[in-house]
Amino acid sequence: MHESKFIKKVAIVGVSLNPLLCPLSLTTPYRQLSSIISIRQFANHPEQATGTIGKYIVEALLQKGQHELTAITRKGSTSVMPAEVTAVAVDYENPSTLVEALREQEALIITLPSTGLDQQATKLKLVEVAVEAGVPYVLPNEWTVNIANEKLADDVFFGGEIRRRVEELGFSAWVAVTTSLWYEFSLGLSPQCYGLNWAGRTFTFHDEGTRKINAIHPKKTMPQNGRAVANLLSLPIQPSGVAPSLETYKNNFIYVSSFLVSQRDMFESVVRVTGTDPIKDWTLRLDEAAVRYRAGLGEMQAGDRAVYMKLLYARVFFPDEWTRVAIKIAEAGIKYDPGSGSS
């Protein structure tokens, strides 16, 4: 399928070079924190943050210095790309322009917003033209929780249509980069996420707040996301011995994690960094994750799209998720296959 040993030509769709509206990190002075986390642009439009990840992927790939990058933009777009990136304008109503733009590309990275029926239709169209153009690898826009867990994926409305369509068409392969939820973005954005209400000095824990989840680098989450993609696409295409290769992850998930953290850990960190008193200055609340999830689901079904974060984050903190998966594996008698390439 490939003549070269490494991926050279990479196309990316959905790049936004605008900085985040609320670039919160642990290096942000906490005297600014109250005003920053009061910004609610992303609470009403959470998909904007996802679309922005393309900027960091481009930066990381350019730093690698071994890829030729093409940014696919809509006809009439005024986006300005770095000099090292070739911008190609296409007409989404004319698929032939997409096919030409993707011809000879070796990987397609989709960073379009993750929500909206129009975006989903566009991403399915992209997959179809990528196959027609002969693009071997597609990275779908799934920088999120572990949606290899199909029950979790269904509950948070990540149905896997893009991955299924890639497999149905048969030529290309998908690789999903699982980063879990972005730490500083999630902590600072809204009480609906990790439970921090800085202005009100409250912290709401899902259940007891002790369940640990994976998170990526606390100071540079989105750049870490970009580095993960760049490192993946810098692997040799074909395996050699036991060394990892891009082929290893064909139609599979890879996982990026910097640490395990609980909400209790987060709260302790906030108290330590701000110099506040956990007893005198804060009100702590407990909210059962399953109840919170069901409430968020009901509110969404009633038309309140902004509560998606409440639903998503509550679902991630369901207890004993992987214990149940392990029991199902044991009951099914699944055996370890060292030659499967799974991780």
Image: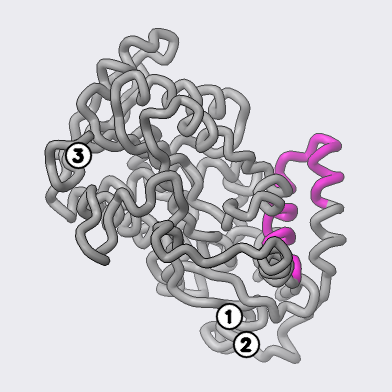
| 173 left or right, relative to 47 | left
Circle 2: residue type:
Thr
- Residue 112 in picture, x, y percent from top left: 46, 35
Frontmost residue, 169 versus 175: 169
Q: In the rendered image, which residue does mark 3 sit on?
A: 82
Give the vertical position of 79 relative to 52 (above or below).
above
Frontmost residue, 82 versus 200: 82
Q: Say whether residue 49 is magenta.
A: no
Dot 1: element: helix
Frontmost residue, 126 versus 328: 328
> Residue 76, can we see it?
no
Q: In the rendered image, which residue does mark 1 sit on?
A: 270
Mark earlier in primary sequence (3, 2): 3
Circle 1: residue type:
Val
Name the front one of labels 3 and 2. Answer: 3
The residue sitting at 20% across, 26% down in the picture is: 104
| 133 left or right, relative to 147 | left
| 319 left or right, relative to 184 | right
Q: Are dots 3 and 2 in contact, CB under 8 Å?
A: no
Mark-to-mark CA distance, 1 and 2: 8 Å
Q: Say whether residue 317 is magenta.
A: yes
- Residue 34 in picture, x, y percent from top left: 59, 67
Mark earlier in primary sequence (1, 2): 1
